[in-house]
Image (cartoon, rainbow, N blue to C red):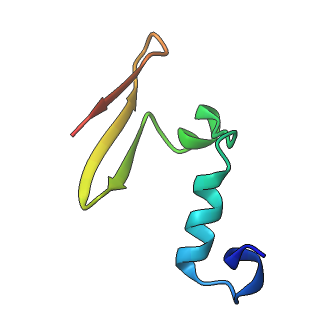
Amino acid sequence: MDKLLTTPETTVDKQKVVMLDRNKRLYSDSLFSHGDEVFIQHQGEQYRLRRTRNGKLILTK
């Protein structure tokens, strides 16, 4: 049986399960519910995702 299904859950196991779900969707309305920018931590770096007045998305490091 799959190790993820037979061992107690850990933070790493939960991350692996999320990575396996390639159809997971995040809606921009929920991301930008508190403003027009969000900060994303990825591999030790911080990125800024911004929504423009025209509704476009811009990702910068």
**Residue at the spot 67% in from the left edge and 84% down from the top edge:** 9
Q: For residue 58, which quarter of the picture?
A: top left
Check the image and name the residue furthest to the front.
Answer: 1
Q: Is residue 56 left or right of residue 7?
A: left
Position above or below: 18 against 35: below
Q: For residue 2, which quarter of the picture?
A: bottom right
In percent of width and height, residue 30 lies at 63, 41
Q: Is residue 34 left or right of residue 45?
A: right
**Residue at the spot 58% in from the left edge and 54% down from the top edge:** 19
Image quarter in which the C terminus is found: top left
Position above or below: 1 against 50: below
Check the image and name the residue furthest to the bottom.
Answer: 8
Q: Nearer the viewer, residue 52 or 42?
A: 42
Q: Nearer the viewer, residue 35 or 48?
A: 48
Position above or below: 5 against 48: below
In percent of width and height, residue 13 lies at 60, 75
Image quarter in which the N terminus is found: bottom right
Check the image and name the residue furthest to the top.
Answer: 54
Q: Is residue 57 left or right of residue 5?
A: left
In percent of width and height, residue 16 lies at 58, 64
**Residue at the spot 31% in from the left edge and 41% down from the top edge:** 48
In percent of width and height, residue 34 lies at 53, 45
Q: Is residue 51 left or right of residue 16?
A: left
Q: Nearer the viewer, residue 15 or 40?
A: 15
User: What is the count of numbered marks?
Assistant: 0
